Amino acid sequence: MARSGTAASRPANLNKESAGSDSDGSLTREQKLELYYFMRLTRSLEERLVNLYRQTKVIGGLFRSLGQEADAVGSAYALDRSKGDVLSPLIRNLGSMLVQGAKPNEIIKQYMAKGDSPTRGRELNIHYGDLVRGFIGQISHLGDMVPVMAGVTLSFKLRGEDRVGLVYVGDGATSTGAFHEGINFAAVQRCPLVVVVENNGYAYSTPLSKQTAARQLVDKAIGYGIAGERADGNDVIATYEVTKRAVDRARDGGGVTLIELVTYRRKGHAEHDNQSYVPPGEIERWANENDPIDRYSKRLVAEGFDKSALDAIDTRVKDEIDRATDEADASPMPDPTDALVGIYADPPAIAPLWFREGIKSAVEVHERPSSWGTHDV
Amino acid sequence: MSEITYLEAIREGLFEEMERDENVFCLGEDIGAYGGAFKVTEGLMAKYGEKRVIDTPIAEAAIIGAAAGAAHMGMRPVCEMQFIDFISTGYDMLTNYVATARYRAMLPCPMVVRGPSGGYVRGGPFHSQNPEAAFLHTPGLKIVYPATASDAKGLLKSAIRDEDCVLYFEHKYLYRRIKEEMPAGDHLTPIGKARIAREGKDISIITYAATVWKALEAAEQVQTEDGLSVEVVDLRTLLPMDDEAIIATVKKTNRVLIVHEDTRTGGVAGEITARINESAFEWLDAPILRVTAADVPLPYSPPLEDYVLPQTSDIVVALRKLASY
C-alpha cells in the first residue's frame, strides 16, 4: 500500500479493501507472462519516447506513467476483449491501451504528429481511440470521460448487450463536476461501468490533501450508493483481481463500482515538470521500494518462472519498439489541407478560406512551439 | 388533417422518430413520468417505456456526455434541457467533447440537444435565454431554431437523423400560440436551408425564431402604411448558415435589416453582416442595420422585458430608416 505521506494511509473503511495479492485468481502461466510483457512494453515505449522528445521529434508534451504501469495493465487485463468491453484511458494509462490492442507505432506516430497517426495529426499523445479494439480516446478536460462512458455503458444496457465499460480518472479528476455527474447518473441507471480512480498522489503539482478532505477516495463510493474497493495499484495481480471482481459485478447487473488504486507518480505532470514541489526522498523511496515491475519480476521468479523467460520478453519488447520507431520516423507529416476534412459527416470537408486558396501551407517548418511549455527544464 | 401547435408538432416529430428507429431514445429532467416542464414529451414514456424515455438526475453535463457516449455506439439520443438556459452547464461537454469528436477521433455523435428557448414570456434572466451565439463559433455543431410548427416538426426529424450533433432551439413563446396543418407523410425540413417567409423587393429582413413573426407584422404594416415591399427570410438553421439564401435576398432588395431576439454584441447579426460585407458589398444601397435585444440580462417585469426585447414597432422604425437612406 501507500508508503508516502501524499497518499492516504489505511484507516478502517466501510468499503472493502483488497488484501495483498497472495492469490492470483485463475491466471494461467501465459497470462502472467503477458502481464509482464504489457508492463515492460509500457515502460520501454515511454523510455523510447523520452529519447525522441530529446531529439525534438516529439512535437508536444510527453506524459509518463513510470511506476504506474501495474495499475493500468492489471485493470485493463480484467476486461473481456472477446465480449467487446470498452475502456477510456487517462493520460497515464498507456498500458491499458496496449492491453486493448494499441500498437507502439501508433503511439509514436501520435507523439510525432504524423499524417498516418490514428488521429492524422489532429490530436496529441495517447489521445486516440478505436471502437473496434475497445478504447475511446480521452479529452484534456478531466472527468469528462465519466459521463461519456456512462453513456457507452447505458447503450450496452439498453440493447441488452453483455458488455462492460471501464473509465480511468486520476485523483484530481474526482474534484470535477463531470466526474460527479457521470458517476451519479451511471449509478442511478445501474450501468455496467467500472470507475478506476488512479490515486498517484498528485494532480500536476497539487497533492491529494489539497484536492479533497475525504480520508480516502474510495469513500466517495458510499455517497453514490455503489460498490467501492481499494487496492495496491503497484501490485499488478491485486489490480487485476480487484478490477475483475468489479467487471464481473457489472456484467452480472450489479451496476457501478468505484475502485481506488493507490500508486505513485514518479515523473512530473509532463516531461517539462521538474517536480520541485515533491518532498525530498519521496520519489527515490517509491522507486527503490515499490517499483511495480521490480516487484512483479521478483514475484514471478519466486513462483518458479525462469528469469530467461522475462529477459526474452524484454528483448522482444525492444525489437518491437525499434521497428515501431523506424516506421513512425519514416511516416509523412500530414498534408496541411487535411485540416479541413471531417468536421462534419456532411459536408465531408470545408472550403479553404479565400486567402489560402491554392496555397498548400503557410508553415513549412515544423518546429516545436516554445509557447507550449514543452521544453526540457 | 387538423391543425396542431408548434409544441404538438415537436411532440409528433419525437413520436414518429421513436417509432421509426429503435435507436432513438430521450433523456432529460422530468421528461418521463411528468412529460416535461412544458409537456413536450407527454405520453412518450407511456408508449416507449422508461428504458427509452429516461428521467435523469439534474445534471446537464451527464445528460450531454452520456448522450455522446451512447451516440458513439450507434444510438440516437435526444436530450432535453428543461430550459435551454441550462445548456450552459453542459457547455464544456458540447464544445470540447461532442463538437470535436468526429474531427479528432473519428467518433460519430449523432445526437440532438433540444430545449425551450427565448423570451416574451416574463421568464426573467434564467428562463428566457437565446444561447445560439454561444455555440455559433464552435465547428462541429449544428444549430436550428424553427419559427413555424411545420418546421418545428420537420427540423426535429432531420436533426434526429443527422449524423452530427444538432442543437435544436424551440421557442417557448411559440409553443401554443401558433398552429398549422402538418405536411403529409414523412415530413423533413432540410438542415442548412433558409425559407422565404414573405416575398418582397424593397428591403430584406433576415431573422429566425419568434422574431420571424414580428418581422412579418412589421412588413405588413409598412406595406399598408408606406407602400414598402419587404422580404422576410427565416433562416431556420443558423449553423451551417444558408449563405446562398442570404446573398440572394441581398442582391434582390439591396437593403438589409437583421433582426434577432438575442442580445446585440457578438450576436448572430454580426456574423451575417460580415458575410454580406465579404460577398455582396457592392450590392448594398444602404448600411446593414440590426434590431436586437439590448445588451442586458433579460429582466422579468413586463415594462422592462418589453423595453429590452425587439418589438414590431422597432422593426418598423428600422425599415423606414433603411427605405429613406
Image (cartoon, coloured by chain):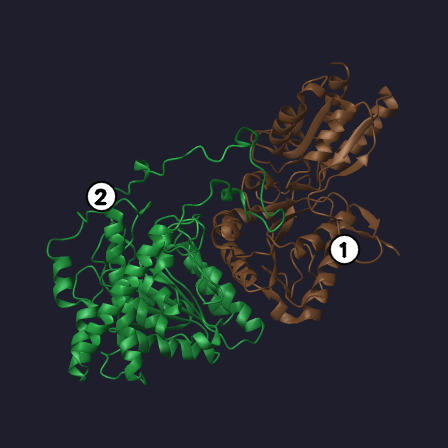
Chain colours: A green, B brown
The number of callouts visible is 2
Residue B123 in view (yes/no): yes
Kind of residue indicated by mark 1:
Glu
Subunit that carries the residue with mark 1: B
Subunit that carries the residue with mark 2: A
Kind of residue indicated by mark 2:
Asp
Q: Position of residue B55 (x, y in %)?
A: 58, 64
Outermost residue, top side: B325
List the residue tagged with mark 2.
A376
Q: How busy is the neighbourhood of tag 2: few (under 14 within 10 Å), some, or many (20 plus)? A: few
At x 25% / y 67%, what residue is drawn?
A40
For the N terminus of chain A, which image quadrant?
Answer: bottom left
Q: Position of residue A207 (x, y in %)?
A: 24, 54
Q: Position of residue A206 (x, y in %)?
A: 25, 51
Which of the pair B323/B239 is nearer the observer? Answer: B239
A59 displayed left or right of A10? right
Which of the pair A268/B174 is nearer the observer? Answer: A268
Vertical placement of residue A229 versus B165, above or below: below
List the residue tagged with mark 1.
B8
Q: Tag 2's secondary structure?
A: loop
A56 displayed left or right of B4? left
Vertical placement of residue B308 versus A288, above or below: above
**Quadrant of residue B26 in the image?**
bottom right
A265 displayed left or right of A97? left
**Quadrant of residue A368 in the image?**
top left
Vertical placement of residue A164 versus B116, above or below: below
A287 displayed left or right of B216? left
Q: Position of residue A251 (x, y in %)?
A: 46, 78
Q: Tag 1's secondary structure?
A: helix
